[in-house]
Image: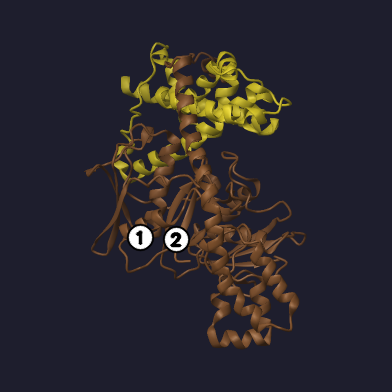
Chain colours: A yellow, B brown
Amino acid sequence: MNETFDRLYNDYHATLFQFLFYMVKNRAVAEELVQEVYIKVLRSYHSYEERSNEKTWLLTIARNVAIDYLRTHNRRSSRWLSKFEFNKQNAKDATPLPEEIVMQKEEVQAIYHSLKNCTLDQQQVLILRYIQEFTVNETAEVLEWSVSKVKTTQHRAIKALRELLDDHTKTNLKGVL
Amino acid sequence: MSEKTKSLLSKLPDVKDHQSKEMIYQQVQNKMKERGNNMKKSKKRLTWVIPSFATGAVVVLSLFLLPGVFDQPDDQSESALTESSADSQPSNESATTATLDEEGKKIVEDPIGKAEDNNAGFVAEEVVAFEHYTPAMQPGTNSLVFSFPDQESLALIPLTFQVDSKQTLPEQIQEILSSFDANANGFGQSPLADASIDVETLNGSKTLVVDFPTPGDSLSSNESILVRNTTLWLADSIDAENINWKTNGEDGYMLGNFGPAEQSIEEEVAPYFLFETETDSRYLAKGSVLYGESATDLESVLSLMKDGDSQNSAYIPSIPEGVSIDSVEKRDDLAVVTFTEDSTFTSEEEAMETLEAIMLTAAQFGYNKVSFLNTGFEKVGPYSFYEAIEIPQSPNAISLSE
C-alpha cells in the first residue's frame, strides 16, 4: 500500500469522511466522494506546499469535491420539485438515515434535518466549526474565506438553524395536537 | 438558545465509512490506473499523429499563403510576417475555422490585396488561426457541439464541429468520431463514444435520443457529469427540446449516484474559462454550473471568470490579470462591457479569448449582442469595436473538411 495513502488515511480519514457525509448527507455518496478526494490528493501531493496545514489542505479538496457534487445534485432536485409542485409539500428525503443518526435522541435528529435546510455556506461553517470542532482560522483556511466572513456566516448560520429548529418543533407539535 | 443549538450540533454522531482501508485503496488504485492508461495510450499515438497532422496543415496553409506571396512583390515585410505566422501555426490549426487577424486587416488596407478581395472575396473567408487559441463558431453555420474531456477527465471541452446539413445526425456524429483525432489534440475519449445517437422530430419539436450499450449505475459522479453535460450541450446545439435517455434500447438511463437522467433541457448559467491541453492548444470551457445569487447577473459571473474556478484548477481565468471590467450595462438585448482605462491585453490572441468568453457567457443571460469599450484595439479577429458585435454561435470551432 502506498505510504502516503496509508499515513493520510490513518491521520485524516475519519475527519474527511465525516465532513463529506455531513455535506452530502448520504453515506453511499460520501463513500464514493472520499475515493475521489484520495485520487485528487495522491495526484497533487507532490505539489503540496508544506507552508499550509495538511489537514486544511485535505479538507479544502474534500469541500471542492462535495460542492461539485451538490451543485449538480441540488439543481436536479430543485428542478424536479418545481415541475411537480404538488409534490413539494409531501416531498420527503428518500435517503435512509444512517444508524448512527437513528439511534440519537429526537432533538439531535431534528438538528440533523434542520441542517439540510441551511444554505450551503452556512452548512459548511456549521459542520467544520461545531461538528468537527475546527477553529475559526482553520475553517477560514479550508473554505478559503477571510476570518471575518467565517464569523459572520457562523453567526447567521446559528440564528438560521435556531429558527429552523423552532419551525420543526412547531410542526411536530401540530401533528400531536 | 444559541448555546443549546451549538451543543446539539456537537452531539451529532461520528458516521463511519463502511469501506475498509484496503477496499478504498484498491478502488482508488483502479480508478487512477484506468485514467492513467487512457493518458499513456494517447501519448503513444501522439508521436505518430502529430507529424502527419502537421504535414497536412503545412500543405493546407501553403494553398492559402502562396497566392499572397506572389501578389505582393513590393512588400517584403508583409510577406515575411505571413511566413513567420505560418511557421507558428499549431498542429491542429487545420481544424479551426475562419477568423481574421491582423494579417487579414493589413491585406484589406493594401490596394493590391483589396483588388484581389473584390474579385474573389478572399479576405472575408480567409482561414487564419491563432497560435494557441481556437476561436468560436460564427452565427449561421451548420454545426453541433460535441464535447471531449481532457485526458485526465478533469475538464470537459465543448467543441463546435461544422457539419454537412445533408447528413443525418448519426452520420454527422460518425464523421466527427472518425475524423477528429481526440488524442492527437490532447483530449480523452468522448463520454458518448459508445452511445447510439439520433434525433426524433414530432410536430416540429426535436428530441435527442441517446442509447447507451451498458447501464450507467456504476458511473462515478465525475463520469456522470461528463456524460450528462456532453449530452445536454449536444441537445442544446441541435435545438432539441428533450432528451430520450435509453439503455440498450430500453427507456431510461441511470447517471450513477445522481439517479435517473432527466429528459428536459434546462437553461444553465456557467462561466466560461480557458483550458489548455497538453498540446498547448487553448479552448474555452464551461466551469461549474452556478445557481442562486451568483447566477443572477452577468457582472457577477464575469468576476468569477477573472478569479478562476475555485472548484477546478484545470480551468484558467478567461479574464487576464491585466484586464478589469469597469461596468456592464444592459440595453435590451445588448450588453455594454466597459474595461477599466488601465486594462491591457498582451496580444490580440489574449483579447480574442477574453472577448469570446464574455460574449458566450452573456448569451446565457439572453443577450444577443455585446459592445466592448476600452479594449485598446479597433478590431480583433472578425470583431470590429466600432459597433455592437453579434454573439458567436458556440465555442471552439472545428472544421473537419480542412
Against B338, residue B255 (above or below) is above
Q: Is residue B196 visible?
A: yes
Circle 1: element type: helix
Specify the subunit that label 1 lies on: B
- The quarter of the displayed image where residue B226 is located: top left
Residue B218 position in % (x across, y down): 36, 31
**Quadrant (top left, top right, bottom left, bottom right) of the N terminus of chain B:** top right
Residue nearest the viewer, comparing B329 with B198: B198
Tag 2 residue: B161
Is B206 placed left or right of A15 in the picture? left
Mark 2 and mark 1: span between their CA atoms?
9 Å
Mark 2 belongs to chain: B
Neighbour class for label 1 at 10 Å: few (<14), some, many (≥20)?
some
Q: Is residue B83 above or below residue A110?
A: below
Between B118 and A114, the one nearer to me in the picture: B118
Residue B278 coordinates in the image, percent (x, y): 59, 46
Of label 2 and label 1, which has the lower sequence position?
2
Mark 2 touches mark 1? (CB < 8 Å): yes
Residue B136, placed above or below residue A22: below
Residue located 22% across and 44% down the image: B249
Residue B92 rendering spot, x and y as whole percentages: 55, 58
Name the residue: 62% across, 45% down: B308
